[in-house]
Structures are given as structure tokens and as C-alpha cells.
Image (cartoon, grey):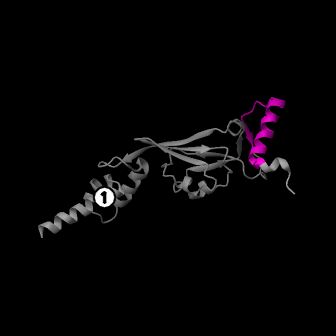
Amino acid sequence: MRHPLYDEKTKLELFQNLLSQLSQNRHLSRRFIPVPERLEGFGLLEFDSEKCWACAACKVQCPEEALKISETEKKRTIALDYWKCVACGECVDSCPKEAVEVKRIFDLEAFLKREVLKCVEAEVKSCVRCGKTIAPVPQHMEVKRNVSELAVPQTYLSDISDYCEECRRQLSALTLLKTRRKL
């Protein structure tokens, strides 16, 4: 038989209430608390902004949907809904640039306030035709650099890579139609 208190609240909500009461009663003033080695499920993600592309591979692999992506016309931001993060390390394993690490630190204030923590921000490359995001600039530059080492016409690097996938398809179709009309 389940305890009546557990019917309404999740384990995390109960834990949050307990910590909240504890911090009020004992006057805890520390924001960051070291996580004991054997205690799993708690930690703090740290993104290396020098390495991170903001490609969102970490967000795609997050089983708890704790990572959030927001985009403006010029920037992509990855943020952490700290309340949801279980420090599983899927984001670490999925990062192609090895830019994410789980620190063995518990952010008490962020947890109690259910804060969303900004992790990293990157400028995005937009399609010259429609304005949609192609990719974050660091990722776009690295892909362009890697493709330039292949036997690819220079026009790809200077023209095609500046268009989103949808516009590339449309432009290819238009080019084919013009070619057919000439025949």
C-alpha cells in the first residue's frame, strides 16, 4: 500500500519540500553543496563555451528533457532546467566537442527556486534566402572547413552552404526546371 503523501507528489517534489524546510530551519547559507561520491542523480552541468557549438546534441539525448533550446534571430541559447536534471551524463556522452561535464556539486538555491540556468550561447548562421537558422556559427564553420578538404566544387562552399536545407532543395528544383526548359 502506498503512503497517502506519495499519491500527490513526486519524489523530487518531496525532496524539494524537505530541503526548503531544512534551509529555513537551519539557516543554510551555502548555495553549492558537494555531492557525495555514492549519491547518484545530483550534479551541476558545466559547458565549456570555448568548445561548445550549441549544436543541441545534448538536448536531443537528455532523457529528462532538462535542457532547453531557445533561439533568436542571431543567437541560440542552451539552458538547464536544474529541477529536472538527474545528472545522468547522457549530455556528456553525446557532445561531439566534449564540451559538457557533470560537476559533483548540488546547487541548492537553483533547485529550491526551480531555476533555469543559462549554460551556453552561440551566434547562429541564417539562410541568406529565408532567414531560418542553418546551424550555430562554430558548427557551420567547422563543417565548411571539413567539406573544403573534400573534392567539392568551390561554389558549394561559397553559395550552397549559405542556404538552409529547404532552400537548397527549392533552388536545386528551380535549376533543374530551367535546365529542362532550355533542352
Vertical position of residue 16 compared to residue 129: above or below = above
Vertical position of residue 143 compared to residue 54: above or below = below
Image spot of residue 20 (x, y percent)? 77, 36
- Identify the residue at image location x=75%, y=49%: 10
Q: Residues within 10 Å of mark 1 (few under 14, many from 20)?
A: some
- Report the residue that reaches farthest toward the bottom: 183
In which quadrant of the rendered view does residue 23 lie?
top right
Q: Which residues, given as a range, are shown in magenta? A: 8-34
Q: Residue 157 or 169: which is nearer the viewer?
A: 169
Residue on which disc 1 sits: 168
Image spot of residue 112 (x, y percent)? 71, 37
In which quadrant of the rendered view does residue 124 lie?
top left
Name the residue type under label 1: Arg
Vertical position of residue 105 compared to residue 153: above or below = above
Q: Which of the image's four quarters has the C terminus?
A: bottom left
Image spot of residue 157 (x, y percent)? 30, 56
